[in-house]
Amino acid sequence: MSIEIIVGLLVVVGVLVWYFNRSTGLDVNADGKVDAADAKQAVANTAKGIKNAVDLDGNGKVGLGDVKVAADAVSSVATGAVAEAKRTVTRAKTETKRKKAVKGGDLSAMTKDGLLAHAKKVKAKANASMTKAAIIEAINAVGK
């Protein structure tokens, strides 16, 4: 093994030992002195914490049931991500169609805010209290 992997593993182990014993300080077994027994207890606490963290199905054992729970969670997240991606693509396609319609002069494809901005640009008399149809009529009246 290369030295980088060994150092990386030592760092990971150190972080795990710290994480699962962070509330105890150096005197892990609370006997009033820091010795090898504290290190042994810290390792035991870490092993127990890791086991509890990976026992996803809550049966007290680490096995295939835990793998199934993890796989189901990943599948659920992936399904949600795919659904969101599809919604984003649909919104993008709709917006692109709307922009093409507006560029082509189809005022009915514009939003009310877009119509009001366009009315201001062409100096048509329109305001937010008007309906979309009334704003379009005001814009068309300027062009005549």
Image (cartoon, grey):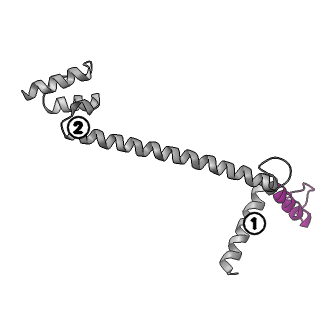
Residue 37 placement, left or right of 83: right
| Amino acid type for the residue under numbered disc 1 | Val
Q: Tell me where residue 39 appears, x and y as whole percent.
A: 86, 64
Q: Tell me where residue 41 appears, x and y as whole percent.
A: 88, 60
For disc 2, the neighbor class at 10 Å (few under 14, some 14 to 19, many from 20) is: some
Q: Which residue is mark 2?
A: 102
Q: Tell me where residue 102 appears, x and y as whole percent.
A: 23, 37
Residue 79 placement, left or right of 44: left
Q: Is residue 40 magenta?
A: yes
In the rendered image, is residue 137 in sight?
yes
Q: Which residue is mark 1?
A: 13
Which residue is more in the foreground, 66 or 43?
66
Q: Mark 1: which secondary structure?
A: helix
Q: Is residue 42 magenta?
A: yes
Judged from this view, the residue extending furthest toward the top is 129
Report which quarter residue 99 is drawn in. Answer: top left
Which mark, residue 99?
A: none
Q: Tell me where residue 72 appears, x and y as whole percent.
A: 68, 49
Q: Mark 2: which secondary structure?
A: helix
Residue 46 placement, left or right of 98: right
Q: Residue placed at 58% from the left, 50% from the top?
A: 78
In the rendered image, is residue 26 in sight?
no
Q: Which residues are magenta?
A: 24-48
From the viewer's perspective, is the residue at label 2 or at label 1 nearer? 2
Q: Residue placed at 46% from the left, 45% from the top?
A: 86
| Amino acid type for the residue under numbered disc 2 | Val
